[in-house]
Amino acid sequence: MKTCFIISFVFFTSTIWAQQPVDSLKNNISSEAANAYYDKISSRLVVGPVFENENYRLELYDITGTSIQSVVVQPNGRMIEFNTWLKSGVYILIIRNPHFNLTRKFRVNS
């Protein structure tokens, strides 16, 4: 019984160890690791890291849920840079593609 338990434990831990998350197959890029911020000096939204050579749907809402902008963007290298002017307030940014779903809430100060 003890031997059976040890063999099954070793098999179980080795299979877990051998598994890799799907995102690690593409340079550890995931929506959990991505960062998004608004650069007020250049009036630009910056998101990254993201997958290169893929299209993303960028949706920007104000805090009430009113859509401000919805466009399809392609990253510049491993970053998405999107020029837009935002006044002071709280915004919700949603960036999607088939295997990347990022939602961030951020504040723009005056």
Image: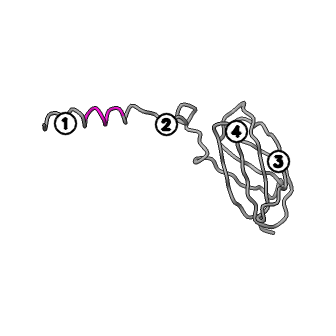
Asked if residue 101 is positioned above or below residue 109 in the image, the reply reads: above
Verify CB contact (< 8 Å) between mark 1 and mark 2: no
Q: Is residue 29 left or right of residue 108?
A: left
Question: Mostly what secondary structure, the magenta segment?
Answer: helix
Residue 101: x %, y % from top left: 65, 45
The residue identified by callout 4 is 97
Q: Position of residue 86 (x, y in %)?
A: 84, 59
Q: Amino acid at mark 1?
A: Ile
> Sequence order check: which comes first, mark 4 or mark 1?
1
Which residue appears at 72% of the width and 50% of the height? 94
| Quarter placement of the N terminus | top left
Residue situated in front as seen by the camera: 37 or 18:
18
Report, in whole angstroms, how far the alpha carbon at label 3 lies from the one at label 4: 13 Å
Labels 4 and 1 touching (C-beta < 8 A): no
Q: Nearer the viewer, residue 87 or 12?
A: 12
Q: Amino acid at mark 2?
A: Pro
Query: Which label belongs to residue 6?
Result: 1
Which secondary structure, mark 1?
A: helix
Q: Residue at x 58, y 32 (%)?
A: 26
C-alpha distance separating marks 4 and 2: 18 Å
Write the start and end of the magenta stretch as one range.
Answer: 10-15
Seen at 83% across and 56% down, the residue is 67
Q: Secondary structure at mark 2?
A: loop
Is residue 92 rendered to the left or right of residue 25? right
Residue with the mark numbered 2: 21
Q: CA distance from mark 2 to mark 3?
A: 30 Å
Quadrant in the picture for residue 56: top right
Marks 1 and 2, how far apart in space?
A: 26 Å
Please count the marks in the image: 4
As measured in the structure, the alpha-carbon distance from the residue carrying label 4 to the one carrying label 1 is 43 Å
* Residue to which mark 3 is pinned: 70
The crowding category of the residue bearing disc 4, from other C-alpha atoms within 10 Å (few below 14, some 14 to 19, many at least 20), is some
